[in-house]
Amino acid sequence: SGEDILIEERDENEVLYQTGIDREGNASEILVCSPGSHALNPAFDVTPASLISGIITEKGIIDANEESIARSTRPSMKR
């Protein structure tokens, strides 16, 4: 279970504000929610294994089981 994993909380301003270029060509930060709003901004989540059917890798999508993961991490025999 993921209950013992400490999840980093990132700054809420990362989701409350966006930066873009205004009409004068200047970088500008704007509030994208109602004034006074607050947000939770976890750096990641813990997904139950039963909900994961595949893992996206640089080699493609592999099945989310020990055999497929082990096979995908073995050194390649190609020359």
Image (cartoon, rainbow, N blue to C red):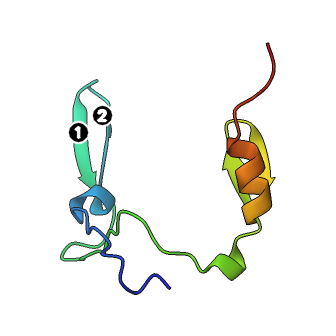
- Residue 29 drawn at (x, y percent): 23, 45
Front residue of 5/33: it is 5
Q: Is residue 44 left or right of residue 38?
A: right
Q: Is residue 53 visible?
A: yes
Mark 2 secondary-structure assignment: loop
Query: Residue at point 21% right, 72% down?
Result: 35
Q: Is residue 24 above or below residue 61?
A: above
Query: What kind of residue is marked 1?
Result: Ser
Q: Residue at x 71, y 52 (%)?
A: 70
Residue located 69% across and 32% down the image:
75
Q: Quadrant of the C terminus?
A: top right
- Tag 1 near tag 2, CB within 8 Å: yes
Residue 6 or residue 34, whichever sits in front:
6
The amino acid marked with disc number 2 is Asp
The earlier-in-sequence mark between 1 and 2 is: 2
Q: Is residue 1 left or right of residue 64?
A: left
Q: Tag 1's secondary structure?
A: strand
Numbered mark located on residue 72 in the image: none
- Quarter of image, res 39: bottom left
The residue at which mark 2 appears reads as 22
Please state the horizontal and vertical placement of residue 71, each as a whole percent of the image: 77, 48
Q: Quadrant of residue 49?
A: bottom right
Q: How crowded is the residue under tag 1: few (<14 C-alpha within 10 Å), some, or many (20+)?
A: few
Asked if 59 appears above or below 10 in the picture, the reply is above
State the CA–CA distance, disc 1 to disc 2.
Answer: 6 Å
Nearest-to-viewer mark from 1 and 2: 1
Residue 28's tag is: 1
Q: In the rendering, at what x and y percent does residue 20 appear?
A: 33, 38
As drawn, which residue projects farthest toward the top? 79
Q: Residue 68, how many percent across, how many down?
A: 79, 55
